[in-house]
Amino acid sequence: MLYGYTGKILDVDLTLERIKIRAFRESFYKNFIGGSGLGVAILVKELSPYTSPLGIDNILVLAVGPITGTLSAASARFALVTRSPLTNILGESTAGGRFGVFMKRSGFDAIIIRGRSPKPVYLYVYNGNVEIRDASHLWGLDTFKTTDILKEDIGKGDIEVAAIGPAGENLVKFSAVVCEKGRIIGRSGAGAVFGSKNLKAIVVGGNTKFPIYDMERLVKKYKEVASRINQGEVKLRVYGTQASIPSLLDFNDTPIKNWSMGLWEEGKKKFEWDYVNSVYKLRRKACPSCPIGCEGVMEDEVEGKVKAPEYETMASFGPLVLNDDLKAISKYNILLNKLGLDSISTGSVIAFAMEAYEKGFWDEEKLGKVEWGDTKVIEDLIKEIAYKSSLRGILLSEGSYRASKILGIEDLAVTVKGLEVAMHDPRAAFSSALMYATQPRGGSHTDLTYLNELRGLLYPEISVDKQLDRFSIDKAELVIKIQNLSALADSLVFCKFGFLGGVTVADLIEFINSVTGWNVDYSWIHETGARLFNLKRIFDVRLGINRSDDTLPKKLLTPLKEGSAAGRVPDLDTMLKDYYRLRGWNEQGIPIKDKVDDYLIGYLPKDYLDILP
């Protein structure tokens, strides 16, 4: 019996309008789990290295995991993987909320989308029934209107919608897929892949059951975790991520003025918690089965109840562009979600444009003024990028890396492997340098290694049992352990904020065993996480990634002149040598065949094996 799974994977060819239902062996699930691990395992078998991200032969895989849709705390999440149009390598992202739960209840562990429809369509998946439906009437609409129309037309309460907006339709390289008007598959440009396939939305729902190994044990564990969290002081529930900026500015962790400044005392005052809450008047909302409830909800005069800006959006459209207008940031957040844009990449490319303008590399006559902190210009640029409605909108829609190449000012772009770096500065916590340099999708922050150095976050079950000096370069072991844990979390699919809110690794193990009956232990986390991480690395290596790509942009290797991290830069070369050695990779950053997990070696196609030393 395959506990925790439906045992079915949906495979949809939009070109042929062909629908298949596939099944995989239990060993496949147990070794690749679900979520991003399962998705990348499918990409490995399905994609050619010559596949164009926006070509007809690219595929999308949406996947849930064994604990999705169960009482496991912090498990209401799903993953999407594809080849990224922004970076040309692995594109992956996860989102919380109800979509993952209703996808599982629709009857499938994963949905594969291939081909290209000749006209706009949406996919409707409900209780194992699948339809490709016309979406011509939805094309051109924003994600809010699309979601409202689909829910009204279908008329069921147990469905959720993942949709693209104009940015995805216009193939903006960092466009997003939007669920529930604010739950975002943001990073890597999956919205453009939807758009390239004329896929406007996916609707999932139903009440399909799947087997749980020990429901009584699961319920008991959930009650124990929920009680413990509810009786404790959960800062994430009280403050969400919206209160993080002032303290992280003190660490030099939040970037200022396109990563160029270390202090911004005047602007910092506007991000203090009391002022933020007076403007946003935040209420908290929880995902299904989550006892933490960290999501911020606010009331907008036009849209009504909406998701409030989170830390990354507040930082991207606040200190990064020298803007301290919180109401403007809220307006941008709604606009980004409606148009379907990743806030990190959008804020970053706008900051890049502002610095290019300031330093005289921006043709004002052709591209207009783009001055720091200009709230009207920021709003205009968001729209122009999404619609590609101006020359500068077209330029910036390519992302910071390509735009910097076109203008010949690569030193102003802050990207790793083509992905805009998230709002945490590696000069403030050196583990971030190693994390960014080695992440499979590029400049991604979601493995949270820096929280050990800055906040003292520990995982004693996997021997992360002490806080490390943030300026120490001895970080390879810390980064590997947390990356492995994160790779597993993204495959289960488990929300990493669960760890911040009081769910322990021991709790997670108990949830897994209660649902699946696998009887795994802490060593399994490292073994499985390493397998999943190596899988992603090998996928990228086949696309040409090596040591030369495991680097940081010039700005992040240039010391700040002020602040608590002034004068500090990580010795990335030394850190990488330690990391490669512990990972079992050669000096070029390629996994060594004899040190790779046996199951993975047996699974990989020959053309993958041939590139391994």
Image (tube, rainbow, N blue to C red):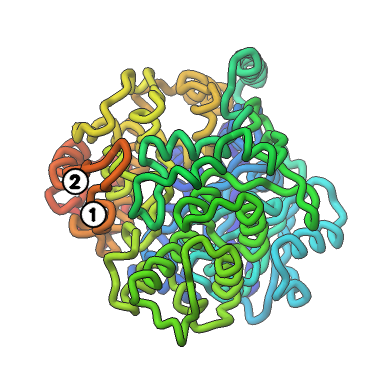
| Disc 2 packing (10 Å; few <14; some 14–19; many ≥20) | some
Does residue 56 appear in the picture of this structure? yes
Labels 2 and 1 touching (C-beta < 8 A): yes
> Viewer-proximal residue, 211 or 370?
370
> Viewer-proximal residue, 245 or 457?
245
Which comes sooner in the sequence, label 2 or label 1? 1
How many circles with numbers are drawn on the protein? 2
**At x 42% / y 50%, what residue is drawn?**
422
> Viewer-proximal residue, 439 or 39?
439
Residue picked out by circle 2: 572
Does residue 528 appear in the picture of this structure? no
**At x 44% / y 60%, what residue is drawn?**
348
Residue picked out by circle 1: 551
The quadrant of the picture occupied by the N terminus is top right
Q: CA distance from mark 2 to mark 1?
A: 8 Å
Q: Of the residues shown, which amino acid type is indicated by label 2?
A: Leu
Residue 602: x %, y % from top left: 30, 47
Q: Of the residues shown, which amino acid type is indicated by label 1?
A: Thr
